[in-house]
Image: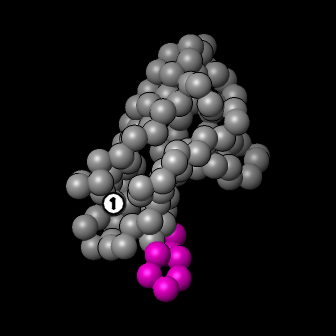
Amino acid sequence: QVQVVESGGGLVQPGGSLRLSCAASETISNIYRMGWYRQPPGKQREMVAVVPRGGSTNYGDSVKGRFTISTDNAKNTVYLQMNSLKVEDTAVYYCNVRTYNVATSDYWGQGTQVTVSS
């Protein structure tokens, strides 16, 4: 069954904004961290922003000051507000949910395309 679902991708002009949302199903327990990764065309997947429950947010260097991650822990939901978008932000964005119970497990969404182009 689908456990992590992203939404909110699309086409936007440089300088524009988009907000991504990700909901993890209630069947996922012991959530330790939620966050976003992205994979630009022809490149490896990279971390965009992650936020451990009760911990400090960590952003990738290329998005600091432009992107903001937030969570609604009661709803197992994580958001990514992306402002001042650049062409190089074009990528498939993936939601990641990491759990911990003796060992860590990662759950991934199917990905949502973000295209920044004029």
Q: Residue at x 56, y 13 (%)?
A: 15
| Label 1, residues with CA under 10 Å away: few <14, some 14-19, many ≥20 | many
User: x and y percent of residue 11 in the render?
Assistant: 50, 26
User: x and y percent of residue 98 in the render?
Assistant: 48, 66
Give the total of numbered labels.
Answer: 1
Above or below, 13 against 115 in this view is above
Above or below, 30 against 45 in this view is below
Residue extent of the magenta highlight: 100-107
Q: What amino acid is at disc 1?
A: Ala
Q: Residue at x 42, y 55 (%)?
A: 54
Q: Quadrant of residue 14?
A: top right
For the C terminus, the image quarter is top right
Q: Nearer the viewer, residue 40 or 106?
A: 106
Left or right of 23? Residue 88 is: right
> What secondary structure prevails in the magenta region?
strand
Q: Quadrant of residue 90?
A: top right
User: x and y percent of residue 31 in the render?
Assistant: 39, 67
Q: Residue at x 23, y 55 (%)?
A: 74
Confirm whether the magenta stretch covers residue 103: yes
Q: Which residue is mark 1?
A: 24
- Helix, strand or loop status at disc 1: strand
